[in-house]
Image (cartoon, rainbow, N blue to C red):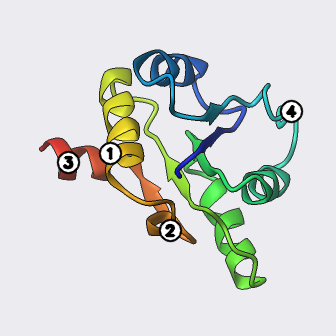
Amino acid sequence: MIRFQADADLDFDIVIAVRRREPSLDFASAADSSVQGLVDTQVLEIAARDNRILVTHDGRTMPTHFQDRRELGKASPGVFILSQFEPIRSVVDVLIMVWAASEFADWHNQIRHLPSLTQHLFG
């Protein structure tokens, strides 16, 4: 079962919209998991501990921390990096599509940029 974890950088409107459109989808906000104010490595660790795919807007530092984690031999449920410029509706559509049409294991140790998913799925 796919579950998502928002970091503090993610637009909370995305979390709200996903929850409204698909109430059975488990999407923890940064506040739900107390990840506000934590560094990327800690956020990645919490997402891994809780078996949640991390969803973030942080395309600047998160990929580096994700790669460092992998080089240390630590697993990750996956990371989705969302463009801040992508329409929320498109992002919500893709997150729900991923949740409904794929398996948790499909994203294990993967980092993906959501705009490429949007073009692939809806282009």
- Front-lying residue, 64 or 28: 28
**Which of the labelled discs sits on residue 34, or is there none?**
4
Vertical relation: 112 (above or below) 38 = below
Look at discs 2 and 1 and give the one toward the viewer: 2
Look at discs 4 and 1 and give the one toward the viewer: 4
Q: Secondary structure at mark 4?
A: loop
Q: Residues within 10 Å of mark 4 (few under 14, many from 20)?
A: some
Q: Would you identify the image quadrant in which residue 7 lies?
A: top right
Q: Secondary structure at mark 3?
A: helix
Residue 32 rendering spot, x and y as whole percentages: 78, 28
Mark 1 or mark 2, which is nearer the start of the sequence?
A: 2
- Front-lying residue, 24 or 8: 24
* Amino acid type for the residue under numbered disc 4: Ser
Mark 1 or mark 4, which is nearer the start of the sequence?
A: 4
Residue identified by numbered label 1: 115
* Amino acid type for the residue under numbered disc 1: Pro
Residue identified by numbered label 3: 121
Mark 2 or mark 3, which is nearer the start of the sequence?
A: 2
Q: Residues within 10 Å of mark 1 (few under 14, many from 20)?
A: some
85 relative to 109 in the view: left or right: left
Q: Secondary structure at mark 1?
A: helix
Residue 62 rendering spot, x and y as whole percentages: 65, 55
Residue 64 rendering spot, x and y as whole percentages: 66, 66
Look at discs 3 and 2 and give the one toward the viewer: 2
Residue identified by numbered label 2: 105
Mark 1 or mark 3, which is nearer the start of the sequence?
A: 1
Vertical relation: 2 (above or below) 29 = below
* Amino acid type for the residue under numbered disc 2: Ala
* Amino acid type for the residue under numbered disc 3: Leu
Q: Residues within 10 Å of mark 2 (few under 14, many from 20)?
A: few
Residue 10 rendering spot, x and y as whole percentages: 60, 31
